[in-house]
Image (cartoon, helix red, strand yellow):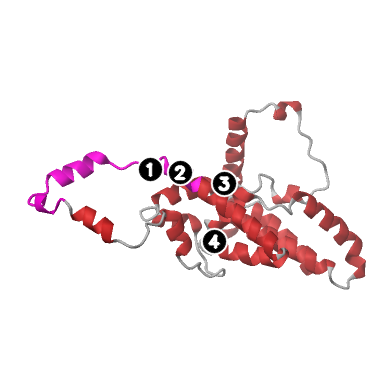
Amino acid sequence: MYQFLKGFFEVTTTFSGTKYPTANLYFMNVYLVHSAIIEASAGVNSYMAPMLAVMREKFMKYWSDYSIFLSCAAVLDPCIKFKFLGYAYSKLYDGDDALQRINLVKTTMTSLFNEYGSGVHVNENIATSASSSTCGLGAFSDYDQYVESTSSHEERSELELYLAEPAKRLNENVNILDFWSKSAARYPQLARMARDILAVPVSSVASESAFSLSKKVITPNRNSLKPKTVEALMCLQDWYRCKLQKKEELLLEQ
């Protein structure tokens, strides 16, 4: 019982983090909960059966359809990519169903990537000045055409190049923000996409509130808040919590 519930506590605490991105951690942690419920339900602990039945019913109602957007965030994690998604879906669903779910994430990922492509601009002035300052290359004006006609391979997008690289090990300690900051020169379009997607928090609820039995009531005042105001309040809340945590850490060190 302790080990079973410990997993739920760890996942909830992870999702409530404010010092690191949580979007890329969504898929793996929800899979851990999903597989834990399935495994426990197939066990022989009859005293847990009523509790597991309720837990499984609620999970299937609210969490069984994995968020496609947050699944894309998992793909942007160099330790996960599509390899882990394929592994997880193969454990949970039949072949055709698993393949269909993976293809949906791939389609969404490609669509998002293409949207970011429209924002990429080349500095034409720099390119023009560089070419005009080059002397003596007029005789090779047809060289570019020759290279294009003799090249047999198809040019791949940043997304395809990133996915073609082997995924890092799951236990490898990778700072995902640092990874994309360093990869921006190689994958500028994909890095901009990662910046926006990884900024989305999985939860805005503190872990203490997640385990509370009291109901949360949305007042008319809160319900009338504009999206921009809600976003600002969420950011301020995270910054304030982070500040308090730093103060607590300093007190403990002293």
Mark 4 surroundings: few (<14), some (14-19) or many (≥20) residues within 10 A = many
Q: Earlier in the sequence, mark 1 or mark 3?
A: 1
Left or right placement of residue 205 versus residue 43 in this view: left
Q: Establish if 48 lies above or below 189.
A: below
Q: Earlier in the sequence, mark 2 or mark 4?
A: 4
Mark 3, residue position? 243
Taking depth in this image into account, of 101 and 230 the one nearest to the observer is 101
Q: Which mark is residue 116?
A: 2
Q: Marks 1 and 4, how far apart in space?
A: 24 Å
Type of amino acid under label 4: Lys
Q: Earlier in the sequence, mark 3 or mark 2?
A: 2
**Quarter of the rendering occupied by the C terminus:** bottom right
Question: Range of the magenta residues?
Answer: 112-141
- Say which element carries label 1: loop
Q: Residue at x 69, y 58 (%)?
A: 30
Mark 2 surroundings: few (<14), some (14-19) or many (≥20) residues within 10 A = some
Mark 1, residue position? 120
- Say which element carries label 4: helix
